[in-house]
Image (cartoon, rainbow, N blue to C red):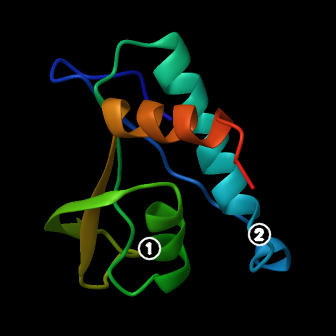
Amino acid sequence: MTQPNAAGIAETDVKLLPAHWGHKYGVEIKRGLLNYLFSHTACSCVQATPNINNIASIKMQEAVGGIRAGMGKSLIPQAAGEKSVTVEYIIYRVYRRIWQKAQRQAEQPTVE
């Protein structure tokens, strides 16, 4: 997690050990990070950049209200003597106003 930059964008990156995959822990961690950032900083949005092939991370971003904001590529250095690898990623953003609206709606009692 980073503090917001000059544009008001903070970043998160959640990594779990394989033994903990598939239990929705990443979604709970991401929600906690969003709650902290929107409660304790002036960020306007929180950004994450999952690898285009990391379906679980993409699902996590979408589960917390992340909206696709673009695509990008990173050049990842490898061990000495090996060529660097280009990795494509998706830019997801969770905007403060949308997050706060969703939190208010979740707190309202349902009428049956």
Relative to the observer, which residue lies in front, 83 or 63? 63
Q: Secondary structure at mark 1?
A: helix
Relative to the observer, which residue lies in front, 56 or 63? 63
In primary-sequence order, the first of circles 1 and 2 is: 2
Residue 34: tell me if it is visible.
no
Judged from this view, the residue extending furthest toward the front is 112
Quarter holding the C terminus is bottom right
On the image, the x and y values in percent for residue 26 come to 67, 60
Q: Secondary structure at mark 2?
A: loop
As drawn, the label of residue 78 is: none
Residue, x 15% and y 68% (percent of image)? 71
Left or right side of 75 for 40:
right
Residue, x 62% and y 44% (percent of image)? 31
What's the distance in space between the residues labelled 1 and 2, CA to CA? Answer: 17 Å
The type of residue carrying mark 2 is Leu
The type of residue carrying mark 1 is Ile
Residue, x 48% and y 84% (percent of image)? 55
Relative to the observer, which residue lies in front, 35 or 49? 35
The part of the image, by quadrant, that contains residue 21 is: bottom right
On the image, the x and y values in percent for residue 87 come to 26, 78
Badge 1: residue crowd in 10 Å (few <14, some 14–19, many ≥20): many
Badge 2: residue crowd in 10 Å (few <14, some 14–19, many ≥20): few
On the image, the x and y values in percent for residue 32 come to 66, 38
Residue topped by disc 2: 17
Q: For the residues carrying marks 1 and 2, which lies nearer the camera in this image?
A: 1
Relative to the observer, which residue lies in front, 19 or 25? 25
Residue, x 15% and y 67% (percent of image)? 72
Residue topped by disc 1: 58
The part of the image, by quadrant, that contains residue 14 is: bottom right
Q: Tell whether label 2 touches label 1 (CB within 8 Å).
A: no
